[in-house]
């Protein structure tokens, strides 16, 4: 929409567009250069000036990746873990966020502060006790070991609680209760359809975090058949020789699925992030 009194070529707009172009270029360039090196021989890494155009060896490097790791099995494992955790986080965090935002119960504020406080604890501190619990349950070398502990998180509860408080008026809740809705019916039929942008944002962030997670899967997934893609890519590192072209070709292919997910939900993701920036 054309803004009244603002010229399209005003200095402010020109500077803004220049900054956006520069930031976009800086954001895309690492991904592009990863493909460029992945399509050359590994000696291209040390060339000066560095290679800037794609080569002809990408499929050869991709073939080496398939020979060295179970690439597609690792992709399937990552898809299963990421999808299951994302679905669980969306359900449990939105349900908890609804309870903290719209219901009254004993110790509500204290419980919420406790949940927020857990965000301050480094995840590395929980590695040993978490490993002992998972080992007792017999889930070592099972995707359950990474799915179950991640089914709900403090950030998701906080994000959904804040969004529901800002977008769902209390009068709408009261009207639903007068019509005889239970609390779960209010959550499912009234709240859930209204918070889709926030859920898309939370879902995308969760999916990306799980897809890129390395430390915890490395601790609990030893067998190659249950490796996620990040763990499988680690095994491409040789003890005496690093084939960087092969590694970057594998990393490029492993990034494509997450880019597809981002493009599918980018509109809802941006909508969810900007919803709170416009008052009323």
Image (cartoon, helix red, strand yellow):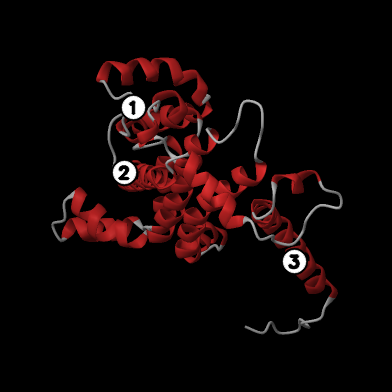
Q: Are marks 1 and 3 in contact (CB under 8 Å)?
A: no
| Extreme residue toward the left, this view | 180
- Local crowd size for mark 1, using a 10 Å CA cut-off: few (<14), some (14–19), many (≥20): many
Calculate the distance from the C-alpha at mark 1 to the C-alpha at mark 2.
21 Å
Label disc, if present, on residue 21 of the rendered structure: 3
Q: Position of residue 91 (x, y in %)?
A: 30, 47
Q: Position of residue 132 (x, y in %)?
A: 35, 15
Residue 173 quadrant: bottom left
* Residue identifier under label 2: 88
- Vertical relation: 54 (above or below) 221: below
Q: Nearer the viewer, mark 1 or mark 3?
A: 1
Calculate the distance from the C-alpha at mark 2 to the C-alpha at mark 3.
37 Å
Residue 90 located left or right of residue 248: left
Label disc, if present, on residue 141 of the rendered structure: 1
Let me know if residue 213 appears in the view. no
Residue drawn at x 82%, y 78% is 10
Instruction: Work out whether residue 178 or residue 221 is closer to the camera in this orientation and state it.
Output: 221
Callout 1: helix, strand or loop? loop
Residue 55 quadrant: bottom right
Residue 94 located left or right of residue 216: left
Residue 57 quadrant: bottom right
Which of the two labelled residues, at mark 2 and mark 3, occupies the earlier sequence position? 3
């Amino acid at each position: 929409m054309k803004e009244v009194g603002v010229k399209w070529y005003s200095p402010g707009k020109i500077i803004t567009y220049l900054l956006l172009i520069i930031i976009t270029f800086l954001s895309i360039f690492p991904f592009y250069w990863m493909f460029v090196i992945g399509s050359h021989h590994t000696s291209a890494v040390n060339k000066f000036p560095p290679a800037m155009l794609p080569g002809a060896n990408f499929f050869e490097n991709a073939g080496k990746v398939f020979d060295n790791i179970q690439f597609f099995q690792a992709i399937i494992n990552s898809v299963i873990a990421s999808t299951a955790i994302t679905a669980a986080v969306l359900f449990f965090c939105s349900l908890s966020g609804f309870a903290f935002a719209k219901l009254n119960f004993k110790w509500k504020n204290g419980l919420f502060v406790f949940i927020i406080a857990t965000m301050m604890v480094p995840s590395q501190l929980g590695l040993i006790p978490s490993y002992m619990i998972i080992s007792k349950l017999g889930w070592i070398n099972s995707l359950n070991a990474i799915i179950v502990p991640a089914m709900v998180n403090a950030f998701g509860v906080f994000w959904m609680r804040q969004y529901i408080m800002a977008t769902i008026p209390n009068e709408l809740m009261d009207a639903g209760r007068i019509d005889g809705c239970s609390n779960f019916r209010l959550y499912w039929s009234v709240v859930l359809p209204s918070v889709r942008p926030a859920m898309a944002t939370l879902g995308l962030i969760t999916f990306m975090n799980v897809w890129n997670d390395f430390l915890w899967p490395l601790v609990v997934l030893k067998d190659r058949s249950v490796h996620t893609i990040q763990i499988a890519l680690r095994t491409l590192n040789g003890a005496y020789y690093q084939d960087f072209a092969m590694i970057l070709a594998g990393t490029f292919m492993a990034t494509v699925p997450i880019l597809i997910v981002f493009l599918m939900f980018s509109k809802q993701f941006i909508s969810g992030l900007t919803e709170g920036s416009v008052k009323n």
